[in-house]
Amino acid sequence: MKPQAIRSTVAGVPPREAIARDILGSQLKWHRVSYEDLATAVNKLRTGLLGVEAMETPHAMLQKVGRGTYSLAFFLELSWVLPIRLPAAWVSLSGPKSALWAAQILRYELAARDLTYARYADLLRRSGMRETANSIALKAMRGTYRMSFVIDSDRALVEAGYEPMLPRELMVEPQTRRSSRARRERRSASTGDDDCLPAEAEILRQRGLHGV
């Protein structure tokens, strides 16, 4: 079967940003999470993991999702507070800092396709993207690139006959949403952490940060 990149269902928005909005917006909708709850959970997680002060507001969350301008690192960070289904290989690369996680993912995906930075940059330029081997190397080192970059990259990869990086499951509603929600509610009751998302409470518990 020929590889296919994820396509957008949002009209009137630049394609790559629209797809990014689709991906994260649908996750929030499926799991019935408000921007206020999401901001609270992310800030608590950052305080526990990195010792940083709260820095996200509901409005900032809304802007990132609505415009589709968030980074892959931000999306990965949300996977710690939302039951987002990520590829097993991505999960195995996870660490306390989402930017380094994103960097490792890019390096992993290129290695899996036997692509050098120069070859990858060439594929992207053929698709109209302004990338060089050096710019790719910086992304692979810092992990500071947008989800829209991955989306454009997937289009270039598919055109060249490669599998896309983003799994199509990100755009498919979880079949076990009802049972998963019930499990999260039971977990929330057992932890007694009613002021944050159940998934976030479990992450803190697993990392020994509950109650921080």
Image: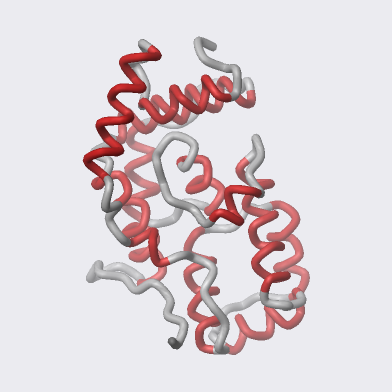
Position of residue 30 in the picture relative to residue 191 (left or right): left
Q: Residue at x 44, y 34 (%)?
A: 81
Position of residue 60 in the picture relative to residue 51 (left or right): left
Q: Quadrant of the N terminus?
A: bottom left
The color scheme shown is secondary structure
- Please tell me which residue lies in front, 193 or 184: 184
Q: Position of residue 88 (x, y in %)?
A: 56, 54
- Please tell me which residue lies in front, 171 or 117: 171
Vertical position of residue 51 compared to residue 137: above or below: above
Q: Position of residue 178 (x, y in %)?
A: 22, 40
Q: Quadrant of the C terminus?
A: top right
Q: Residue at x 27, y 55 (%)?
A: 173
Total numbered circles: 0
Q: Residue at x 31, y 35 (%)?
A: 35
Q: Position of residue 55 (x, y in %)?
A: 49, 28
Vertical position of residue 129 compared to residue 85: above or below: below
Vertical position of residue 189 compared to residue 72: above or below: above
Q: Residue at x 34, y 16 (%)?
A: 195
Vertical position of residue 73 compared to residue 208: above or below: below
Q: Position of residue 34 (x, y in %)?
A: 27, 34
